[in-house]
Each structure stands twice: as structure tokens, then as C-alpha cells.
Image: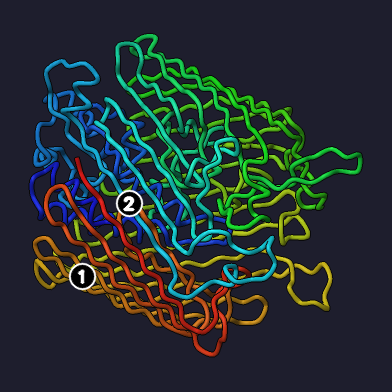
């Protein structure tokens, strides 16, 4: 997953050493961000989005403050210093020049390299000439499978039996030039899905496709996309389809959402994004107007109500269509969406108003559970919001207030650069229990911006270059019932993280996280009792660069949960990496002993470029993988990945149709990529 991305950087900066450094920086970002896990989040989808973000770097000379914030890596002070430097000296001509920016360390520059580019001034050409001679492109093919046969392939029930072969297949092609153009296509078939050629059922071969064409900065047209796109505006209360994170080892930059507006949607998350046309028009130097129209079939579960109407009871977000039961939910409902945004922006102020209208071909009618009494129902949705950000000296204010019917969702915050080494963030959120956001992604404890009041504060402080302290605390209240929660209640969690850079080759990380949240009792003989779940997690990691070729990392994680009985889990992982000329190798061996699923562990694994692996470590056993990358020349790269899982004292791994016989599971993955 990582190697090829850094080959792209190698071609950009003409030095293999830089590409290898960026490889390690991207892995560090993943380790920092994916530290807080829950069962409601698709982390592999988030990781895939991160790599696709890295595949579409921004031009450091043209990027606005809002685009720079969208990297999640720069503080307000660092953004201000970059803009001040550009205004004083003009365009940055080389990556080494970034070191001349005040308070920009070498470590910071290495961290952002995967996400930026420096476009040279080029003679005027038409679009077709630029596509032929400028930008970077790639063609990718990937396949993966389990060596063990899953139950769904040989089950006798024809409605449950998988209809396709055991291999997942993915093809992706893309060509782009930062701030100019982008076009691409992604095609995917999951393991068990059948290759079909049925245009009437919107399946010409692969089970899922997305495609886009984007043109930017053409006179008054700032951005134009036709095909699949995503939209991030304000704090994500109405539009939050872009890559977004939340609480984790990075306590400041991932909390605030960023106003990036339209971007191509190239992920394999089938129910994500919009499909249609979107554009941003520049009215003058400070005012722009954006609009979009989307028409997309979505996966859902249907039902027939008491009077014979066919309605939708729930969304199906897995994207799996391997048997007749799963195919019955494929593209069950058509969503037509349109919206508009008016935005004013200058050097210190951003103001925007927006609206959204969504209509469905079938009525949404959730199952009548008490906890989802206020979930959206019906065929039409309308909402509007106002958002802002304002920088005054070292203080950056941001927020958004949205209205659905008469119900309010609100998110406001303050980010303060107390010094060039200290950042502090305060954030307050209020999402009415009857407020609904169908395509939003605001910061929240729950998976949706509904039925929650919360207050978050985060701090990050650096002492010289060797010591970095980070911390956050988040307090939240649920005004109504939730899934697995019989009554309104409160909860909180907090994190403390310390990183020590012994020298350029060795660093140490200690992290402690504690959480207290309510949940229904799971004891069968007790009805309607709420337990307060307390959880403590400790992570320690040491990384050492032994030479230019060899790197080692040791990581240990502890977890203890009281629910109300005490459960514990421990995981120990050893990583070894080797790099030499055209060959790269990553190996990990991990052992774990986890007494209950509540005490489970996650550790991000290296994978082939633009793919993600974040397995659940539960039970007693071991997990290992080997990732090999071969770079034959500037154009051709190849990856091979093998992963092995062993669990003690079990006869079956997995559950349901994905279960395999025995206590071991073996996965293989192969990827080829051609750069052009």
C-alpha cells in the first residue's frame, strides 16, 4: 500500500531517500490517527481514503489556508507562516526551500511531503496537450483471497450460496495534475460476487464502478466535476462526504472539519459520495458560488408495509452482493440530490451559507424501534446551514449551525496557537435528538450527528524537538435512547500521549486512554439495566532505524474493561523493515491474549498501496504478515502480501457465511501498478 505511493514521490523529487522517508511518515500518521476504535466506524474505508488523498497532492504554492488545514497535519501558526513566506518571497521553487519558513522543522516537512507537490510554471497549452504531456498517472490491478474456503461457497441454501469465485478484483486508472485536471475510473468485484454483463441492472462486468472527470482553475470556473464526487463544507453538518477523522493520537488537527468543497470520489465505499455534476464558479476574488446535482442508486433493505407499499427499512453499506439475499438489496433506491453554496473568503475570514435537497424513489421507513424513533423517515429531505471561520491574531474561530425542519445542529470551536510550540482547542457541539443529517460527517461520539451534546478540549505541546505532549478530554450527553442504550445518559473519554525523540534514528511513544460510557446490560436475567463500562488502554512503542536499510519497531498494548466483570487484553508486535534499491520488505509477528471482545486490539498493518488492513485481535493467538515490493523501473512496480492468523482452542474462524473451518486463516494479495 505504501511502496508505490513513495515511488510517485520518488519521480517527483528525484531521490529514493526522500521516498523512503515519506513511506515511514505516512505509516506514522496512520499510527497516530487510528488509535481510538469502535464498532461503528469503517476504518479500512478511512485508510483507503487517506491513501487516495495522498495520491492527489495539493500544490503548496496555490493552496489556500483551508486546503492546508485539510491535510490535518499543520497548526494554525505553521499555516500562517507559510502564507506569510509566499507573500514575501513568491512561489516556492523546491521542496528544500520549505526549510526557510519560520518554525517549519525538518520533521514537519517530512510529515507533509506525501500530500504536497510543487508545480512548475509551464507554457500555455490546451487541456488535451496538458493531459498528454503533464501530470502523473497510474494503472493498478489488484487481487486477493483467503486460501481457506468460506462457508458461503459451499452452503446448500441457494439463496445464501456465493455465486462468484473466491478472488476479489480491483482495477483503478487515474491521471491528474494538481490544480489543473483529473480523470479516473475504479472497478471492483468482491470475493464471491459473480462477474455479470447486465447493463439493465447497472452491472457491466464488475459489481461496482466509479468514474470522474475534473477540470480546475479555468477562468471563472474554479472547479468542475462530472461523475463521482464528494463534498466537504463547513463542519460537516450537511455535507461531510470527504475524508474525516476524529479522536485519536492527533488531538488538535483532526477535530476541526475543513472546507474543501468538491473532490473526486474514487473510493470503493459503494454507498458513499454523489454521482452527477458539481461546479464552483468564481464571482470575484472573494466570492464564489457552488452547486451540484446528483442521481445515484443506493443499496438498501426493502420491506412491504401493512397497506402494501414497498419502503426502505435500512441502508446496506457493506457493498457485498455475493448471493441472492445480498443482491436483493443492490441498488434498491434512487437518490436525487441537489444543493448550493455561497461562500465569501479572504485572508482571515470565511463565511458560507448552503442548502441541500434530497428525494428518494421509495419512502424511508426505519423499523419501529424505540431508540430510532427520531430517525429520518419519508421521501424528501431539506436542510440548510451557515458556517464560518475567522482568524484573529493567534486565535482561529470556526463553526456551523444547521437547521432541519425546526431542529438544530450546531458545532463551534476555538483553536488557539498559544505559542509556536503549543496549540489548544475547544469545541462544543449540540445535535438535537430530532436533527437529521443524511450526508453529513460532523465530529461526534456517535456515528451520526444526532442526539448528542458534547464538549471537547485538546492540547499539544512540544519541548524543543525531542518531547511532544498531547492530551484531550471529551464529555458527551445523549438526550434520547441509542442502540444498546435504554435511557438518556452521559459518558466521557480522555487521552494522554508522550513522544520522545531520542535522536534522529530512535523514538519512543507512550499513550494512555481511559473511557467511561453507558451500555445496556448483556445479562439475560436482568431487564433494562444500564451498566457503566470503564475502559483503560495503554500503548508503548519504540522505533529504531538501525541503518539505511534496516528498521525495527516494537509495540505493546494493554486493555482492561469493566463491564461489570473485568476483562483484559494484551498484544505484542515486532516489526522488521528492509529496503535496498528496487526491493522493500516489511514483516510483522504479533501475539495477543484477549479475554473478551470488549478488550480487543487493533494495530494498523502495512499493505499494498491504496489498500488497508486493520484486523481485530481477539482471543488467544498470533497474527503475522509479509509484504514484498519490487520496483523494476520508473514505470513498473509489484507487491505481494501474505498474512497468517492463528487462534487457540477454536474449530472455526469468522462467523456466518464468512466462517472458515479450522483455527488458522491465510490471506494472499497481489498488486501490479504501471506509472505513466
Farthest residue to the front: give it.
Answer: 197
Number of other residues with Cα within 10 Å of mark 2, as a class: few under 14, some 14 to 19, many 20 or more: some
Q: Is tag 1's residue or tag 2's residue first in the polypeptide sequence?
A: 2
Residue 529 to residue 56: above or below: below
Which residue is identified by label 2?
A: 141
Relative image position of residue 668 (x, y in whole percent): 37, 68
Relative image position of residue 266 (x, y in whole percent): 41, 40
Relative image position of residue 325 (x, y in whole percent): 68, 56
Please tell me whether mark 1 or mark 2 is closer to you in this view. 2
Side (left or right) of 578 relative to 276 = left
Quadrant in which the C terminus is drawn: top left
Residue 447 to residue 594: above or below: above
Which element carries disc 2, helix, strand or loop?
strand
The residue shown at (10%, 53%) is: 16
Name the residue nearer the viewer: 552 or 275. 275
Name the residue nearer the viewer: 611 or 546. 611
Residue 550 seen in the current view: yes
Number of other residues with Cα within 10 Å of mark 1, as a class: few under 14, some 14 to 19, many 20 or more: some
Residue 611 to residue 8: above or below: below
Q: CA distance from mark 1 to mark 2?
A: 25 Å
Where residue 349 sits, quadrant-wise, is top left
Side (left or right) of 358 relative to 72 = right
The residue shown at (45%, 32%) is: 229
Relative image position of residue 406 (x, y in whole percent): 73, 28
Q: How many marks?
A: 2
The residue shown at (67%, 69%) is: 532
Name the residue nearer the viewer: 278 or 111. 278
Which residue is identified by label 1?
A: 577
Name the residue nearer the viewer: 507 or 463. 507
Amino acid at each position: 500500500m505504501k511502496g508505490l505511493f513513495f515511488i510517485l514521490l520518488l519521480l517527483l523529487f528525484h531521490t529514493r531517500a526522500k521516498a523512503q522517508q515519506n513511506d515511514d511518515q505516512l505509516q506514522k500518521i496512520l499510527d497516530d490517527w487510528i488509535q481510538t476504535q469502535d464498532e461503528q466506524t469503517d476504518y479500512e474505508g478511512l485508510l483507503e481514503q487517506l491513501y487516495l488523498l495522498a495520491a492527489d497532492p495539493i500544490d503548496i504554492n496555490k493552496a489556500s489556508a483551508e486546503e492546508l488545514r485539510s491535510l490535518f497535519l499543520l497548526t494554525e501558526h505553521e499555516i500562517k507562516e507559510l502564507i506569510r513566506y509566499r507573500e514575501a518571497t513568491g512561489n516556492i521553487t523546491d521542496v528544500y526551500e520549505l526549510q526557510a519558513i519560520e518554525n517549519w522543522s525538518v520533521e514537519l516537512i517530512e510529515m507533509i511531503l506525501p500530500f504536497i507537490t510543487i508545480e512548475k510554471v509551464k507554457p500555455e497549452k490546451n487541456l488535451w496537450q496538458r493531459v498528454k504531456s503533464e501530470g502523473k498517472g497510474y494503472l493498478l490491478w489488484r487481487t486477493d483471497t483467503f486460501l481457506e474456503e468460506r462457508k458461503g461457497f459451499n452452503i446448500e441454501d441457494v439463496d445464501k450460496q456465493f455465486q462468484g469465485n473466491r478472488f476479489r478484483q480491483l482495477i483503478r486508472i487515474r491521471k491528474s495534475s494538481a490544480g489543473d485536471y483529473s480523470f479516473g475510473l475504479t472497478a471492483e468485484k468482491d470475493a464471491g460476487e459473480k462477474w455479470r454483463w447486465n447493463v439493465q441492472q447497472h452491472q457491466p462486468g464488475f459489481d461496482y464502478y466509479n468514474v470522474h472527470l475534473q477540470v480546475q482553475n479555468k477562468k471563472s470556473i474554479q472547479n468542475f466535476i462530472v461523475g463521482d464526487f464528494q463534498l466537504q463544507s463547513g463542519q460537516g453538518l450537511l455535507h461531510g462526504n470527504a475524508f474525516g477523522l476524529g479522536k485519536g493520537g492527533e488531538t488538535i488537527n483532526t477535530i476541526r472539519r475543513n472546507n474543501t468543497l468538491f473532490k473526486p470520489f474514487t473510493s470503493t465505499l459503494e454507498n458513499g459520495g454523489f454521482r452527477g455534476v458539481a461546479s464552483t464558479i468564481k464571482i470575484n476574488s472573494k466570492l464564489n458560488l457552488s452547486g451540484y446535482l446528483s442521481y445515484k442508486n443506493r443499496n438498501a433493505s426493502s420491506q412491504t408495509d401493512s397497506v402494501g407499499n414497498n419502503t426502505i427499512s435500512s441502508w446496506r453499506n457493506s457493498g457485498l452482493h455475493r448471493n441472492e439475499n445480498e443482491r436483493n438489496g443492490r441498488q434498491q433506491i434512487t437518490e436525487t440530490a441537489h444543493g448550493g453554496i455561497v461562500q465569501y473568503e479572504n485572508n482571515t475570514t470565511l463565511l458560507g451559507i448552503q442548502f441541500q435537497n434530497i428525494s428518494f424513489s421509495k419512502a424511508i421507513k426505519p423499523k419501529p424501534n424505540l431508540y430510532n424513533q427520531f430517525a429520518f423517515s419519508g421521501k424528501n429531505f431539506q436542510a440548510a446551514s451557515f458556517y464560518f471561520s475567522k482568524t484573529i491574531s493567534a486565535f482561529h474561530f470556526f463553526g456551523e449551525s444547521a437547521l432541519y425542519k425546526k431542529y438544530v445542529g450546531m458545532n463551534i470551536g476555538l483553536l488557539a496557537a498559544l505559542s509556536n510550540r503549543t496549540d489548544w482547542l475547544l469545541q462544543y457541539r449540540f445535535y438535537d435528538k430530532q436533527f437529521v443529517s443524511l450526508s453529513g460527517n460532523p465530529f461526534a461520539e456517535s456515528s451520526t450527528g444526532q442526539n448528542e451534546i458534547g464538549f471537547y478540549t485538546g492540547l499539544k505541546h512540544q519541548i524543543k524537538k525531542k518531547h511532544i505532549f498531547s492530551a484531550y478530554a471529551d464529555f458527551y450527553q445523549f438526550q434520547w435512547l441509542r442502540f444498546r442504550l435504554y435511557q438518556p445518559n452521559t459518558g466521557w473519554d480522555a487521552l494522554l500521549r508522550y513522544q520522545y525523540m531520542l535522536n534522529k534514528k530512535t523514538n519512543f511513544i507512550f499513550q494512555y486512554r481511559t473511557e467511561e460510557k453507558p451500555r445496556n446490560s448483556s445479562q439475560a436475567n436482568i431487564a433494562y439495566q444500564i451498566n457503566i463500562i470503564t475502559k483503560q488502554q495503554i500503548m508503548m512503542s519504540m522505533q529504531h532505524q538501525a541503518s539505511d536499510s534496516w528498521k525495527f519497531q516494537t509495540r505493546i498494548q494493554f486493555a482492561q474493561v469493566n463491564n461489570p466483570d473485568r476483562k483484559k487484553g494484551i498484544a505484542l508486535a515486532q516489526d522488521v523493515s528492509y529496503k535496498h534499491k528496487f526491493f522493500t520488505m516489511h514483516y510483522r509477528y504479533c501475539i495477543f491474549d484477549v479475554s473478551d471482545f470488549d478488550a480487543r486490539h487493533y494495530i494498523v498493518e502495512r499493505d499494498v498501496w491504496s489498500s488497508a488492513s486493520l484486523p481485530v485481535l481477539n482471543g488467544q493467538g498470533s497474527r503475522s504478515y509479509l509484504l514484498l515490493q519490487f520496483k523494476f523501473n520508473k514505470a513498473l512496480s509489484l507487491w505481494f502480501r501474505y498474512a497468517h492468523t492463528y487462534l487457540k482452542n477454536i474449530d472455526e474462524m469468522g462467523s456466518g457465511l464468512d466462517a472458515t473451518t479450522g483455527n488458522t486463516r491465510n490471506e494472499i494479495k497481489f498488486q501490479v501498478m504501471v506509472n505513466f
